Image: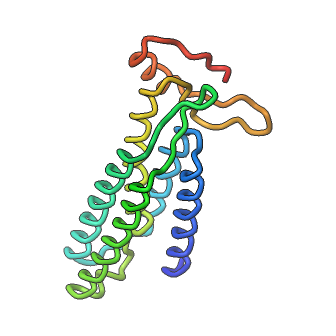
Amino acid sequence: MTGTVEVVLIAAAIIYVLARRLMGEPAEGKRLLILPAVLGVIGLTQVSVTSASAIVFLVASAALSVVFGLLRGLTIRTYEQNGIVMLRYTAMTIVLWVASIAARLAAGFVMNQIDPSAAHAGNGLMLVVGAGLLAEGLVVLSKAVRVRGQVVWSKGRRGAPHRTSPFLDSWQQKLHGTRHDSSR
């Protein structure tokens, strides 16, 4: 995949996620954990570090992305609607997205000044974005289980009931001392 295509696909994915989450959507465990992890693994397979400075740049970029992901997760609103735990991005979440993108661009600019070959050699953009989204998802799930309502693993399709996660259900039960009807 060329760098331009990768950037366009990642930008489209981020815009899609932002739009959905600004409107509010179920706090779906699968989307919050599995999809970012897959993105990170794909990104990891595309990384080709050629120097010590490239490794430092990749590790620092991933760490910065994780920090921004954790901060974004703290700003996301979780609430119950019709028995389901929902999430919604806030204005501060968007500010943090813009700041994280600006930080990534600034880091790339600095790296290009220090070691131009390292800045372009398998820059790990998908890995970095996946790491940030995974950190965000972990924070959101830890907030979601504290809300009264069902945290779903994946939404049911075509009228099917939502799938639940025994792990998320038991975590929520420990916090609330209640049981959920897993047929929702």
Q: Between 10 and 17, which is closer to the camera in this rendering?
A: 17
Q: Is residue 112 left or right of residue 8?
A: left
Query: What residue is rendered at 43% in x and 46% in y?
Result: 76
Q: Between 74 and 11, which is closer to the camera in this rendering?
A: 74
Locate residue 102: give its quadrant: bottom left
Query: What residue is rendered at 79% in x and 38% in y?
Result: 158
Quarter placement of the C terminus: top right
Work out whether 139 lies above or below 112: above
- In the image, residue 35 lies at what x, y percent? 52, 50
- In the image, residue 73 lies at what x, y percent? 38, 47
Work out whether 33 lies above or below 92: above
Residue found at the far front of this picture: 91
User: How has the structure been colored for display?
Assistant: rainbow
Quarter placement of the N terminus: bottom right
Work out whether 75 lies above or below 167: below
Q: Is residue 17 left or right of residue 134?
A: right
Locate residue 127: give its quadrant: bottom left
The number of numbered discs placed on residues in the rendered structure image is 0
Query: What residue is rendered at 66% in x and 37% in y?
Result: 155
Residue found at the far right of this picture: 158
- In the image, residue 19 lies at what x, y percent? 58, 58
Q: Is residue 112 left or right of residue 33?
A: left
- In the image, residue 180 lies at what x, y percent? 56, 16
Query: What residue is rendered at 47% in x and 52% in y?
Result: 36
